Amino acid sequence: MTLKDLPAATRPREKLLALGAASLADAELLALLLRTGVRGQGVLQMAQALLGRFGGFGGLLRADAGALRGIRGLGPAKRAELAAVMEMARRSFAQQLSTTPVFDAPDKVKQYLSLHMGGLAHEEFAVLFLDSQHRLIEMKTLFRGTLAQTSVYPREVVKEALARNAGAVVLAHNHPSGAAEPSRADEFLTHSLKSALQLVDVRVLDHLVVGRGVVVSFAERGLL
């Protein structure tokens, strides 16, 4: 069944145009992207099944290509569209952070990092390099690790900060387990990097630990 087969009043596109995007349920929004279902499963049912499988939009849009490739009905075109939506969301947040000091938009910083790192099956360590007014210059993933740990080298972080003439940084890494509670090792690493960056007059404004659906701030915890 396609969306055109539905009664006019219940078609997601018509509802969106008449009442706005906020009026649509999650499955209806996703159905607009998918457009068609598969044999034995209408597009709305397929959308609902996908959201259930991945735990909502967050999990679906962060799912890697391999996880999506094996799903019946998600061909290359649909997978490409989902990836494009995810990238548009990332770029939208990056654009906002490049014009607004990060302290003025802490929730956007968390959402931006969650989009980048929240669904990864391995650990990554990234740095948001900021200018003297604490606006985003660039986010860069510097280290990738195993499921359990990442090796982070302070001199590499210092080198990258100097290359961008950064005035401050926000550190970030994810916990593949999904829990975002900082460990003792996370605290030790934070203070090691803070000491190294102080030598070149670069401030560490925060260290954010990204879990599944939650981001913990060292600054908010008073751990910096």
Image: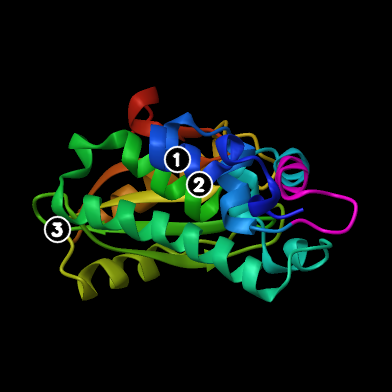
Q: In which quarter of the image is residue 95?
A: bottom left
Circles 1 and 2 in contact, beta carbons < 8 Å = yes
Circles 3 and 2 in contact, beta carbons < 8 Å = no
Give the residues in magenta: 37-48
Instruction: Tell me the residue at 66%/56% (across/down).
Output: 63
Answer with mark 3 or mark 1, whichever residue precedes in sequence: 1
The alpha-carbon separation of the residues under discs 3 and 2 comes to 42 Å
Few, some or many residues within 10 Å of mark 3 (<14, 14–19, 20+): some
**Element at label 3:** loop
Q: Position of residue 176 (x, y in %)?
A: 67, 48
Instruction: Tell me the residue at 34%/34% (across/down).
Output: 107
* Residue named by callout 2: 13
Residue found farthest to the left:
133
The alpha-carbon separation of the residues under discs 3 and 1 comes to 40 Å
* Residue named by callout 3: 131
Residue found farthest to the top:
221
Answer with mark 3 or mark 2, whichever residue precedes in sequence: 2
**Element at label 2:** helix
Q: 118 or 60, which is in the foreground?
A: 60
Task: Using the image, determine if residue 116 lies above or below residue 108.
Answer: below
* Residue named by callout 1: 16
Instruction: Tell me the residue at 74%/62% (across/down).
Output: 68
